[in-house]
Image: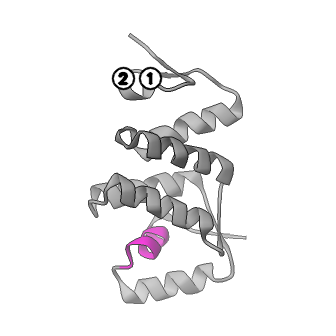
Amino acid sequence: MRAVDTNLLVRLLARDDARQLDAAERFVSKGAWVSQLVLAETLWVLDAVYGRTASQIALAVEMLLKHEQLSLQDEDVVGAALARFRERPSLGFSDCLVLETARKAGHLPLGTFDRRLGRLDGAQRLP
């Protein structure tokens, strides 16, 4: 299966360049895979560059999970991270994804200096 990079995924979600959007849609029409790294980078771009809100970012992740032609790496982990992010959007999606990835791998607790993340089940805040 083909894979997509951050720029292509941003075009699909931001829909801000008609020519690139058309090319991106044609590329994924045969199926494409999205790595967790590309997903995290894309969501950072949507936040930092496009100023998307937490609810808009959550909606983008939900749309990607439901997309007929896209397959996300460890969709179950992404889904769990989305649920966690919707509960605590102030954390940021990437933090939720890191925690849920560690949980699936069986490597808990997740050590952190982040106060918010440290409050979650499976995380341990360090002094």
Q: CA distance from mark 1 to mark 2?
A: 7 Å
Residue 121 x, y percent position in the rendering: 55, 25
* Stretch in magenta: 7-15
Quadrant of the rendering where the N terminus is positioned: bottom right
Q: Quadrant of residue 2?
A: bottom right
**Secondary structure type for disc 2:** helix
Residue 36 x, y percent position in the rendering: 57, 52
> Vertical placement of 36 versus 2: above or below?
above
Q: Quadrant of residue 48?
A: bottom left
> Vertical placement of 106 versus 83: above or below?
above
Residue 58 x, y percent position in the rendering: 45, 56
Which residue sits at x=61%, y=67%? Answer: 66
**Secondary structure type for disc 1:** loop
Name the residue nearer the viewer: 25 or 6: 25
Which residue sits at x=47%, y=52%? Answer: 40
Residue 119 - label:
1
The kind of residue tagged 2 is Arg
Name the residue nearer the viewer: 62 or 39: 62
Mark toward the viewer: 1 or 2: 1
Q: Write down the residue under mark 2.
A: 115
> Vertical placement of 82 versus 101: above or below?
below
Marks 1/2 in contact by CB < 8 Å: the verdict is: yes
Which residue sits at x=35%, y=83%? Answer: 17
